[in-house]
Amino acid sequence: MNVRTLGQKCLVIVGATGMVGGYALRYALEKPTVGRVTAIGRKKVGISHPKLKEVLHRDFADCSALAETLSGQDAAVFCLGAYTGAVSDAELRTITVDYTIEFARVLRGSSPDAAFSFLSGSGADPTGRSRAPFARYKGEAEKALLAAGFPRVYIFRPAYIYPVEPRKEPNFSYRLFRAIYPVFRALFPNQVIRADDLAEAMVDVALRGTEEREGVVFENRDIRAMVESLHPPKG
């Protein structure tokens, strides 16, 4: 069992088997300021580490059983989601909105002072007027999180997320973007972000110590600026 030293943070990551969540997990485990990382998901992450506590949870429609696990957390990085077209519209809303709100409810009750980093998406519309379901649902989730009572909520709205490592792309659009990524990045640098850079930014901002209450929305341009302030861009 890992025992964190004084001053180290406890971080919970939801969706650590996904692309961005996986990088967030690896990055957090490497940070000396993090003493414990709790990965919550429906399947195992496939790695072992003395800092890692893994909790399998099948039904995010009810997170009540996670109350004890979520106690004493300093921050959460929420990357659970689904690709448009991979599931039905009803399921997309359930995963994007209902699961987020339910997890936030239990985390807020168990760790009321925790910071919350949320993986949203470019074009998210909290007004609900967008014709794109993804934009409406992400916007609805954002609005609920900002009203949930957390002292600090950070909304990340990346545009195209470059996978970095080869993978089976979920649809034709992603296959196309991956193929033209070098040209697209050169022409439209603020419309792309590397998955590992995005994950690093989400973890770092959640762990940032501040006494101020804030709810901040980071568009793709802002995320790139955050990353570049830490180190030169990798490409």
Image (tube, rainbow, N blue to C red):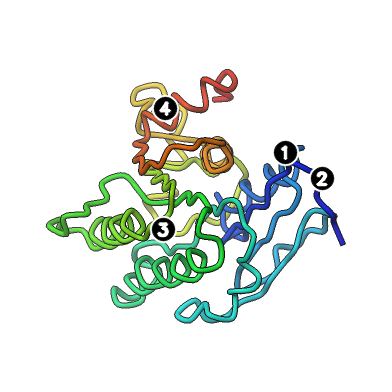
Quadrant containing the C terminus is top right
Residue at the far front: name it: 211
Q: What's the CA distance linking mark 3 and mark 4?
A: 20 Å
The front one of 4 and 78 is 4
- Mark 3 near mark 2, Cβ–Cβ under 8 Å? no
Residue 185's disc is 4
Q: Earlier in the sequence, mark 4 or mark 2?
A: 2
Based on the displayed image, in which of its 4 quarters is residue 218 positioned? top left
* SS at badge 1: loop
The front one of 218 and 146 is 146
Residue 128 in percent (x, y) is at 16, 59
* SS at badge 2: loop
Number of other residues with Cα within 10 Å of mark 2, as a class: few under 14, some 14 to 19, many 20 or more: few
Please state which amino acid type lies under the numbered disc 1: Thr
Identify the residue shown where x is 43% and y is 72%.
102
The front one of 150 and 33 is 150
Query: Quick check: 90 above or below 156?
Result: below
Please state which amino acid type lies under the numbered disc 2: Thr
| Residue 161 in the figure: left or right of residue 76 | left
The front one of 121 and 234 is 121
Q: What's the CA distance linking mark 4 and mark 1?
A: 33 Å
Mark 2 = which residue?
Answer: 5
Please state which amino acid type lies under the numbered disc 3: Asn
Q: What's the CA distance linking mark 1 and mark 3?
A: 38 Å
Residue 33's disc is 1
| Residue 43 in the figure: left or right of residue 155 | right
Q: Earlier in the sequence, mark 2 or mark 1?
A: 2
Identify the residue shown where x is 49% and y is 37%.
211
